[in-house]
């Protein structure tokens, strides 16, 4: 038995971060579909028995009928693969939703209820349930006992592993890892967390989002593939997304002006495929304006520049000065020592105040 496990595709997502940058958002939406097609091509080539989609296949608010028709045409290309979908918080099974109205291929099974269902196959029992709203608190695993009929037991579910619901926050089915382990599923095909996570015993698995959506989702993105051999599950991760979101740190202590920073960035050999966030770090000896630096950058795939630098002041020396600067610095340190302000707030106050006195 062979399977592919994907989640959090978010077809037709708006890509707000990218949409203002030379129509990259639209380009990224096309790449979503291309990534999904890669999954289907892999399934065809390797004769995969099951495709598990653990929620957030599409964005309910934005999904187009043409996109649904496209992915359904891909489903039609793998008629011998059983496709199991557990709707999540971005694509819940609700009245008049695409899951409710659209006619998917006969090899597609969509869990409809927030109660736990089970599909009994020849080699495996497949459990799952659906979000019936855009948030969810009830845990379908609370009072279940998995079957002991000589088959493997798989779970397909969209949930927030170890997520805790704060009083004013919406819940996205928070379930503890200890709860999963106590139930002894052979494989938990989960979705919701966009970064890859595989437990030490390979039984609790998030493949992460199929493609990356931003700088909070660094690293490779793709799918998990598995095969059952002699009742043992072997899994592997395969990269699908050609692009990565990458953070690069540049230490400004190496430079004497903004123009030197701009020249350095413009001459840096960035991978043209990836998207970059530049963090300016270290202590500087000159004034710095991120907007001015951004306007001088020629690389279109640099999406953000963040100033994390500090002015290169000798604070200890200034504290001993018998003038306004010395009095100001000592007053700010007193506020920090009295826990009126945080260390971060103190650093910012010092920089703003000392810069103003220059």
Image (spheres, helix red, strand yellow):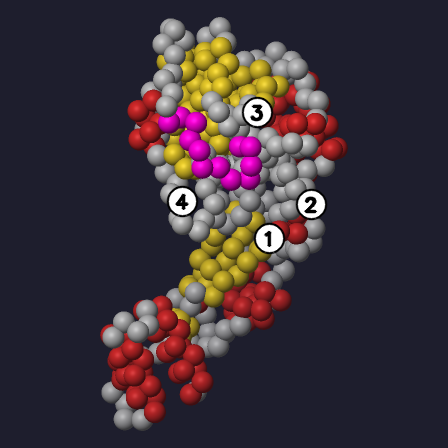
Residue at (37% x, 71% y) in the render: 345
Residue 232 locus on image (x, y percent): 37, 13
Q: Is disc 3 placed on a helix, strand or loop?
A: loop
Establish if 352 lies above or below 123.
below
Q: Earlier in the sequence, mark 3 or mark 2?
A: 2
- Which residue occupies the extreme bottom position in the image? 323
**Does the residue at mark 4 contact the one at mark 3 (Cβ under 8 Å)?**
no
Cα–Cα span, label 4 and label 1: 27 Å
Residue at (54% x, 68% y) in the render: 290
Residue 308 locus on image (x, y percent): 43, 65
Stretch of the chain drawn in magenta: 131-142
In the image, residue 132 lies in the stretch drawn in magenta: yes
Which class describes the residues within 10 Å of circle 3: few (<14), some (14-19), or many (20+)?
A: many
* Residue at image mark 4: 165
Q: Earlier in the sequence, mark 2 or mark 1?
A: 1
Establish if 281 lies above or below 181.
below
User: Where does the C terminus fall, quadrant-wise?
Assistant: bottom left
Q: Is residue 85 left or right of residue 349?
A: right
Q: Is disc 1 placed on a helix, strand or loop?
A: helix
* Residue at image mark 2: 26
Q: Is label 4 or label 1 in front?
A: 4
Asked which quadrant contains residue 93, the reply is top right
Q: Earlier in the sequence, mark 4 or mark 3?
A: 3
Establish if 120 lies above or below 321.
above
- Checking the image for residue 17, the label placed there is 1
Cα–Cα span, label 3 and label 2: 31 Å
Q: Is label 2 or label 4 in front?
A: 4
Which class describes the residues within 10 Å of circle 4: few (<14), some (14-19), or many (20+)?
A: some
In front of the other: 338 or 45: 338
Residue at (66% x, 56% y) in the render: 20
- Checking the image for residue 112, the label placed there is 3
């Amino acid at each position: 038995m062979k399977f592919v496990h994907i989640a959090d595709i978010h077809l037709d997502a708006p890509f707000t971060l990218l949409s203002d940058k030379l129509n990259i958002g639209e380009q990224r939406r096309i790449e979503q579909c291309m990534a999904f097609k890669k999954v289907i091509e892999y399934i065809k080539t390797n004769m995969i028995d099951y495709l598990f989609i653990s929620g957030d296949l599409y964005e309910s608010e934005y999904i187009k009928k043409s996109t649904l028709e496209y992915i359904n045409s891909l489903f039609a290309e793998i008629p011998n693969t059983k496709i199991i979908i557990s709707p999540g918080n971005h694509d819940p099974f609700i009245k008049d939703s695409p899951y409710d109205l659209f006619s998917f291929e006969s090899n597609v099974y969509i869990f409809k209820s927030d109660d736990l269902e089970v599909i009994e196959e020849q080699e495996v029992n497949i459990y799952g349930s659906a979000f019936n709203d855009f948030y969810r608190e009830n845990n379908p695993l609370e009072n279940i006992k998995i079957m002991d009929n000589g088959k493997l037991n798989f779970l397909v579910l969209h949930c927030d592993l170890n997520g805790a619901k704060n009083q004013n926050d919406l819940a996205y089915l928070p379930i503890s890892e200890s709860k999963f382990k106590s139930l002894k599923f052979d494989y938990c095909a989960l979705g919701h967390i966009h970064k890859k996570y595989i437990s030490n015993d390979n039984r609790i698995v998030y493949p992460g989002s199929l493609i990356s959506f931003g700088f909070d989702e660094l690293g490779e993105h793709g799918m998990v593939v598995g095969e059952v051999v002699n009742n043992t599950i072997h899994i592997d991760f395969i990269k699908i997304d050609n692009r990565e979101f990458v953070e690069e740190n540049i230490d400004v202590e190496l430079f004497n002006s903004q123009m030197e920073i701009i020249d350095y960035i413009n001459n840096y050999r960035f991978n043209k495929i990836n998207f970059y966030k530049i963090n300016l770090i270290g202590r500087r000896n000159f004034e710095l304006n991120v907007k001015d630096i951004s306007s001088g950058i020629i690389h279109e795939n640099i999406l953000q520049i963040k100033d994390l630098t500090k002015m290169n002041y000798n604070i200890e020396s200034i504290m001993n000065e018998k003038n306004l600067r010395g009095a100001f610095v000592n007053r700010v340190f007193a506020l920090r020592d009295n826990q009126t302000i945080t260390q971060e707030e103190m650093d910012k106050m010092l920089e703003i105040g000392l810069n103003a006195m220059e």
